[in-house]
Amino acid sequence: MEAMRNDSVCSLGSGSKAIWHVNPLDFPFPLMMVQIIVIVLTSQVLYICMRPLGQHKFVSHLLAGIILGPCVMGNNAKYRRIFLGEEANMGLFDTISKIGVVYSLFLVSVKFDVSMLRRTAKNAWKISLASFIFPPIVFFATVYPIFSKVSGFTGGFMLLVLFVGTLTFSFFPVIVQVLEELNLMTSELGQLALSSSMFSDAMQWVFSVITLVTMKKDAVEGIGTLFSLLALLAFSIFVLRPLMKLITKRLPEGKEVDQNFVIAVQLGVLVMAFVSDIIGMRHTSGPIILGLVMPYGQELGATIVARTETLVTEFFMPLYFFRIGSGIDVTSISDWKSFAKLETIIVVSYAAKFMGVSVAGMFAKLSFKNSLVLSMVMSIKGLVDLIAYTRWRDMQIIDKQLYTQLVLSMVGITMLLTPLIRFFYVLKIRRGSSMSDPQFRLNIQSLPPRNEIFRILCCVHNEESVPNIINLLEVSNPTEASPITAYVVHAVEFIGRSAPLLVPYKHHKIRRSYSLTNKMVQAFKNYSKSSRGPVMIRPYTMVAPYKSMHETISRLALDKFVPLIIIPFHENHQSLVLSNMTGAIRQFNYNVQAYAPCTVGILVDRGFPLQMNIHNFTYSVVVFFIGGPDDREALAYASRMLDNPNVEMTVFRFIVRVIETETKLDEEIEFSLDESLIDEFKLGNLGNERLNWNEIEVENAVQVMTAITKSQGQYDLAMVGRRHADVSLKDEEMVDFMQNPELGVIGDMLASADFCNGRVNVLVMQESRELRIGAFRSGGSGRNSDSKSGFN
């Protein structure tokens, strides 16, 4: 059997004996396949189970490795003999897992945006310096005397400094993975953590290079390593980067990067790993350098990430964590005095980092709570820390007990901190105390009457949305007394970058990298030059994951005091459906409605924009008013539109008759607000022949729907609120009848083919949830009314 094992390395052999005569797990190749299957499945099952508890993927992968290693399953002798096998048979497995690490660090560095250091340097460097320097200072001032009594560490003073620093380093790849899992990437705290970790990584790189060079056996070897590293950096910056820029520059618009270039870069990762290893640096240094010199933008980097990341993250990395787990043995912890002393050092180091980051965060004008959360984020451990600990063990700087203790401690700390971050840091994007200030309560009704700039934030995903948004801007009546400022944000899916971006279009890298943005911006600027009144276009490009784009949009709306956000419906155009973007955009729309600090309008663009001639332009709008904050916002916006002499408007006001014995105070307030706005609207448009006002009495939702069906006409735009004060039209009670709950009951009907054959654009308005009052908040019904006031 042993001879057969040695002769048949890759399979069971050619004799077709297979399972009927031999044990397949006695052969390296079948054993390896079974190991990979079990490892990946265990990692995925643990991740599914632990994700609701706030844990991220790193913890589940590492725990899977520990469970399948000698600590848990390895206690069974039969399992250990069959599944773990002999250490000599794990060589290929170990190599494959390390290749996964090489590609993982390369992918993180591909996403690295060096320009972010400049944008966030003001506060980030303070936090980074505090987290980098404060823990070693506290260590040497307090627990350094007892470290000499900790057995298992054989390094000198420089390695001791590096050891203590690594315990509390904030590695950028680790922070990126944590923020992605916690969906904090685009939050203010997340961006500050990213920037701070970038500075920490830069300082750590310099310190590590110095340490590695000084550790060489002689000065000549150290100097040779240093100059070889500088030569590799120069070659990457001045040869490889221009070459990759040339590739992306010559790429035809709308075309994917040629497969040969993708293969060349993926192969180049291994070449750079080999070169950095033979010059005396770590094998991970070369791939990181290659990723950093990849040109900014979506073409080459995005293609590399899209074609590589899933395989590396979900297949190769669990194998590496299994190798880590197979090297952990709890039984190796026998010197409990040293164990207690090392735990004291770990606790003191983390406490020092918490204190340093929290104080630096408060100096950066963060609240104490957010400063504490930032210190938690900066203290989470991950892959890079694991690589460092494993390297120390392989170099025999630490023994097996210290290694096991360090790995188990980092798992415990990470498992503790990630749920705490989820619990303490709720994503409300500056909406805590600031939203209690009336100046932050942004809606159309609260604007002064036509005597200041009207700000609109328009989010676009593709150029097909541009014509009808331009029409909407023109209908919004830009005048000299009340010009319009449109913040046009091109939302680009987050691929190939770790740090999310929101930058003005004038940024030179944006102009070079996003040709679609160029086309859309030019269309808006052309409109600005020919509009009836002054319209100022402020274009931005936003690069972020769809799941957190709403945070960036909300921050921009607050910064610019925008009362209205316009976002496109997820099924606006066939191109979105074909590109499988509809689900992500729909979730983005849900999130904007839930978190925006101002009114949100979802524009259902039916693809029939007017052939707009500014000098011969007419637009027909229909408004359906039932009652409640959202309908009031729709009517307030319609009032501004009606000031445009080229707009004709029809308003249907539905008076819902509900038989009740008692009317709640909230309902009275809601009804009063409705009546006040209606009276103001009527008074402002007395004698306006372009307005057709209609009032219809109804008793239930069915009659409302029937009346709307009968009200069809030649309209260009239909407007309605998403939610209504009347109890019979509550979204939660009508959800079974709606295909698109984000549009509400009436909005969903107007967007269907049942209304005007689906050829009318629809704008569904929703006031900020922070502003809801009265019957809308309480869930009460609208007030009874027998009045049917005519309008002349």
Image (cartoon, rainbow, N blue to C red):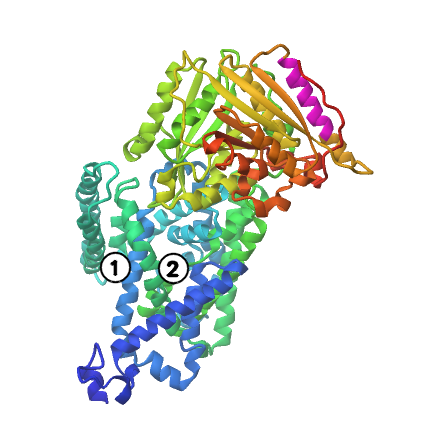
Q: Which residues are magenta?
A: 671-685
Q: Nearer the viewer, mark 1 or mark 2?
A: 2
Q: Mark 2 highlights which residue?
A: 383
Tell me, yes or no, whether the highlighted magenta stretch contains residue 678: yes
Could you tell me the amino acid type at mark 2? Leu
Q: x and y percent of residue 320 in the render? A: 34, 66
Could you tell me the amino acid type at mark 1? His
Q: Residue at x 55, y 35 (%)?
A: 747
The image quadrant of residue 251 is: top left
Q: CA distance from mark 1 to mark 2?
A: 15 Å
The kind of secondary structure element at disc 2 is helix
Q: Nearer the viewer, residue 235 or 76?
A: 76
Tell me, yes or no, whether the highlighted magenta stretch contains residue 296: no
Q: x and y percent of residue 98 in the render? A: 29, 64
Q: Does residue 333 show up?
A: yes
Residue 283 circle label: 1
Mark 1 nearby-residue class (10 Å; few <14, some 14–19, many ≥20): many
Mark 2 nearby-residue class (10 Å; few <14, some 14–19, many ≥20): some
Q: Is residue 480 above or below residue 225?
A: above
Mark 1 or 2, nearer chain start: 1
Left or right of 766? Residue 58 is left
